[in-house]
Image (cartoon, rainbow, N blue to C red):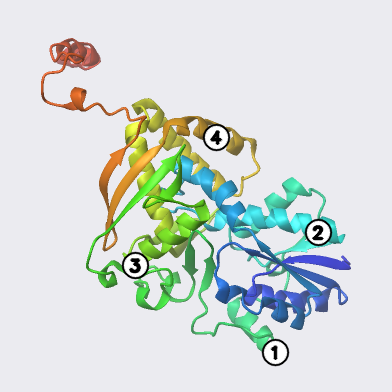
Amino acid sequence: MSYKKIVLSYSGGLDTSVIITWLKENYDNCEVIAVTGNVGQGDYELEGLEEKAKKTGASKLYILDLKDEMANDYIAPAIKAGATYEGLYLLGTPFTRPLLAKKLVEIAKKEGADAICHGCTGKGNDQVRFELAIKALAPDMPVIAPWRIWDIKGREDAIDYAEKHNIPLKISRETNYSKDKNLWHLSHEGLDLEDIANVPKYDEILEMGVTPKKAKDEETIIELEFEKGLPIALNGEKLSLVEIIEKLNKIGGENGIGILDMVENRLVGMKSRGVYETPGGTIIYKAHHLLETICLDKETMHFKEIVGNKLGEILYNAQWNMPLKEAICAFVDKTQETVTGKVGLKLYKGNIIPNGLESKYSLYSVKTASFDEDNEYDQKDAQGFINLYGLPVKIKAKMEGK
């Protein structure tokens, strides 16, 4: 297949740095247009990208500021749903891939490109996330996935290729973890982490915070204000969602919050071990759940937990553009109409401790919950309730007694 112009999802990391040169070698010196999304990975990773991209063969580099769009359109639905994958993973990478794919398609159409290329390996989830999103937005657009077709067999080979072609890298063979950083989290995979018997070298790999042992020895007290399921203020200061996440990342990191060592079931079938840092997100999820305990009725809250788990699977499994995701988000939005109020928290050495709740929509009644006399709840009524509720148990016991 011959392509004259290819749009590449470019991070400047090992894989995509090598890919620019490889594309020009294998597709008749085609034009490569690099696209980088600023999703909160930090200035260090964005520094010098344009010079590097052009030096290795790209004709131009788009750097797109996507933080607000990522927060408002991709992270926000997950917060409202309490979406997790396998009960632990607060997502992160799954938020960025459909967004980046959307921008790749937009630029490919604008530039009249023949194909889109990504640097995802053939063993990972991200290849599916990119390509399903591209199929949804540009069904006939060819996608090039070098890791599935080239002779490079692993990251060591990729480093060899980079050295042979004088491609500058910010990593070494000893620090060659596979990382993905954005506004919401930082993931670490590879090297010693591939052996699940190894304890992660937290003091060496953590970037967004410290371990609880190294966290400061004093409580940090914060207050988050929510409106319709989303945080809108921190300690009384109205802020954007991006600003709240960034501030909570710093606060949470200092207090040893949001560190996860997890073996997960990848979409492609294998089990994979990763260490995740999600300090701000962990705080937001906890505060949101606490507020829901007083703002949602029992049946809605319990059913929403099931729905949240399902949405987490959908986002993890590259189904962002599926009708079920849209339907679930519509249901969740309805449940969040009364999830408004303030949540106090104490943060201490990895712990998030409730420190007061208030909401004008609270369903908690002090009078009804109290052990004192209550005109709305007659304790004598409980006897009839227990008799009816326990009737199946009673009948079964009598049957077995025969």
Query: Considering the numbered disc 4 on the image, is that residue within a helix, a strand or a loop?
Result: helix
Which quadrant is home to the C terminus? top left
- Label drawn at residue 328: 4
Residue 108 numbered tag:
2
Left or right of 232, for residue 52 = right
Residue kind at label 2, given as amino acid type:
Ala
The numbered mark, 3 or 2, whose residue comes first in the sequence reads 2
Residue type highlighted by circle 3: Glu
How far apart are labels 1 and 2 at the CA level?
Answer: 30 Å
- Give the residue at mark 3: 254
Mark 2 element type: helix
Whole-angstrom CA distance, mark 4 to mark 1, is 50 Å
Q: Quadrant of residue 39?
A: bottom right
Q: Which mark is residue 164?
A: 1
Q: Tell me the CA gap for discs 4 and 2.
A: 31 Å
Q: Secondary structure at mark 3?
A: helix
Q: Secondary structure at mark 1?
A: helix
Q: Dot 4, how many residues are within 10 Å of its Cα: few (below 14), some (14-19), or many (20+)?
A: some
User: In the image, which is nearer the foreground, mark 3 or mark 2?
Assistant: 3
- What's the CA distance linking mark 4 and mark 3? 35 Å
Q: Quadrant of the N terminus?
A: bottom right
Q: Which picture quadrant has residue 63? A: bottom right
Q: Nearer the viewer, mark 1 or mark 3?
A: 3
Residue at position x 37%, y 38% in the image: 341
In this rendering, is residue 356 above or below 295? below
Residue type, numbered disc 1:
Lys
Residue 57 in percent (x, y) is at: 79, 79
Residue 151 seen in the figure: no
Q: Give neighbour class at mark 1: few <14, some 14-19, many 20+ (Cα, 10 Å).
A: few
Side (left or right) of 391 relative to 76: left
| Pointers 4 and 2 in contact (C-beta within 8 Å) | no
